[in-house]
Image (cartoon, helix red, strand yellow):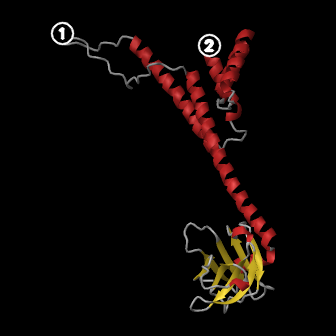
Amino acid sequence: MNTHELIEYTMLHALGLLEDDERSAYEAAFDAAPVSVQKRVRDEARRMADLGDLVPEVEPSVELRDVVVAAVRAAMREEENESRIASQEATPAPVIGRIDASTPAPARVTSQPKLSTSPRVHRVWRVAAVGFAAASIAMGVVMVNINQTMQQAQSRALVDSLYDQIGAQYLESTIFDANTRRVALTSTNTSNKAVAAVWYNPDWDSARLFVKNLASQQNKPLRLVVLDENDNIVQTIKTFTPTGELEDFNVNVNLSTQRKLAIYPGAADEISEALEPVLVSTDGTL
């Protein structure tokens, strides 16, 4: 083996891509090479294989290894075919027979057309390109795994946060208990991102009012009220001052009978027909 072949086989040997006979031939050739050549081979192979932080420190899958091995061996077979075709072209084709002396010999047809490889690329760089491609595939797999792990972590963090803020009893009843009722409150203004919901379960000490993106102007309180069929306020259930974050409040309401709700600005003594609701209840199935 020459120096270039030693460099190539050193990289393949480091990746564990050599067969037993190839590995034995490489090791024998490397041991027989001068010390200076061995040093150059090591330095060059280390320089070409040093991808730094681009290569993730993960064990490649069996499928990925098969793809890399197949690509490397296809490149080697192409190089062998090119060498064989080139040697055949250098050898004159034998003449089987001629009709007369003036009949030219037929053109020789090779068993495989020669593929144009201009400008020619040495096998070392082909192997390096395959290595970079394998690294890119591995990085893509790792990024997908990281993305899935982050999504799972975010979901777990959200559930843990709800457990901490709402409480395990309320959260499990909200999700699984068929007796749980809900009334959602939204704004008729599409630009208003505030939302609210009242959850009720007969086993709870009180119903729960959840609000998000709801902030009162000038830190003034808001009111959760019950409406009649004509949208008139008949009862103030809760006066509260939200901050705009996800918050919850205990409220005394029975959603089995009181399902038409709204959130109005102002205190209870400021009830006026001119006031517009901030949020109003919508029909729901719970």
Q: Which residue is mark 1?
A: 100
Foreground label between 2 and 1:
2
- Of mark 2 and mark 1, the one earlier in the sequence is 2
Instruction: Say above or below: 132 vs 267.
Output: above
Q: CA distance from mark 2 to mark 1?
A: 48 Å
Q: Is residue 83 left or right of residue 51?
A: left
Q: Give residue 108's position: percent from left, percent from top.
A: 32, 18
Q: Secondary structure at mark 2?
A: loop
Given residues 198 and 176, the one toward you in this image is: 198
Which residue is depicted at the point 71% across and 41% down? Answer: 59
Question: Dot 1 surroundings within 10 Å: few (below 14), some, or many (20 or more)?
Answer: few
Residue 139 in the image: above or below residue 196: above
Q: Position of residue 171 (x, y in %)?
A: 75, 75
Marker disc for residue 37: none
Instruction: Between residue 60 and residue 137, name the one nearer to us.
Output: 137
Q: Which residue is mark 2?
A: 2
User: Would residue 175 appear left or right of 127 to someone viewing this image?
Assistant: right
Question: Label 2 is placed on what type of residue?
Answer: Asn
Three-letter amino acid code at the position of disc 1? Asp
User: Residue 34, can we see it?
Assistant: no
Q: Which quarter of the picture shows residue 253?
A: bottom right
Is residue 51 visible in the rendered structure shown here? Answer: yes
Which of the 4 image quarters holds residue 220? bottom right
Q: Residue at x 78, y 80 (%)?
A: 250
Residues at badges 2 and 1 in contact (C-beta under 8 Å)?
A: no
